Amino acid sequence: MTKKQRAELVQTELEKLYPTTPIPLDHTDPYTLMVAVALSAQTTDKKVNQVTPDLFAVAGTPQRMAKLEEFEIKELIKEIGLSNTKAKNLKKMAELLLERHSGIVPQTYEELEALPGVGHKTASVVMSQGFGFPAFPVDTHIHRLMTQWKLTSGKNVVETERDAKNLFPEEVWNKLHLQIIFYGREYSPARGKGEKDFITKMLFEK
C-alpha cells in the first residue's frame, strides 16, 4: 500500500467514525477559543472546559481580562497546569489585543503568534476553527498517529504538519485534524496498548 493509499484509507475510515467534529474546547467566539486553546497546553480539554465557565463569566473579553490582576486570573485557572505562566500570558495577551488590534482577534498567523501564549498550533486552531481558514494544527497526538501510520517521517510537529498538508486535500484539513485527535483518544491512546487501533491493523496487516 502506498503512502497516498494509506492516507485515503485513513481519511475514509475517520469520516465513517466521526462524520461531525464538534470543537472539543467550549467557547463562544475567536477570543474565548484562543484563550481556551492557550490554556490547554499540557492540560486536558476536559479540565479546561471545567475551568473556563467561571473564567469567561468574569473575563470573557480582552477588555475585562486586561482589568484583572495576574493573581486574580491565576485563582480562576489554578486547577490547570502552568497556571502562573498562563495567567501572566492571558493578561498580557489581552493588553496587546487592546493596544494593537482594538480588542479584536487578528486573522493572520504572524499577528496571532506575536501574542503571549500563542504558538503556531494555537494560532492554527484559531485560524481554522475560529475563522474557517484551511489549517492543519498538529499536536503530539496527531504527530504520533501520523508517524504510526507511516504518513510522515517528520521529527517534529512542524515537519508532520507539512507532510499532512501535502497528503490530504485542503478542504478536509479543518475537519481531519479533529478526527485524528478523536481517534487517538478513543482507539489509540498514547499510554494504551493499541488493541482497539483498527486503522493501524488495516494499514499493515499481512
Image (cartoon, rainbow, N blue to C red):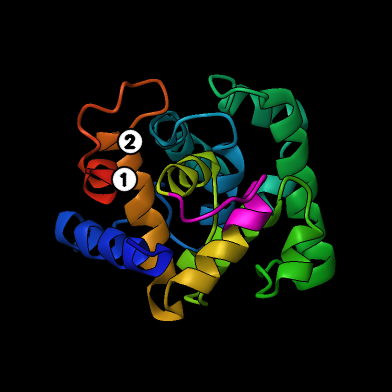
Residue on which disc 1 sits: 182
Q: Is residue 97 above or below residue 156?
A: below
Q: In the rendered image, which quarter contains the N terminus?
A: bottom left
Residue at x 54% of width, y 38% of height: 40
Q: Amino acid at mark 2?
A: Arg
User: Helix, strand, or loop for circle 1?
Assistant: helix
Q: Amino acid at mark 1?
A: Phe
> What is the quadrant of residue 63 in the picture?
bottom right
| Quadrant of the image occupied by residue 42 | top right
Residue at the (20%, 32%) spot, across then down: 196
What residue is shown at x 51% (from left), y 76% (from top)? 134
Badge 2 density bin: few <14, some 14–19, many ≥20, Cα 10 Å: few
Q: In the rendered view of the protein, which quadrant contains the C terminus?
A: top left
Q: Nearer the viewer, residue 183 or 95?
A: 183
Residue 12 % position (x, y): 22, 65
Q: In the image, which disc is placed on residue 185?
A: 2
Residue 188 lies, in percent from the top left, at 32, 33
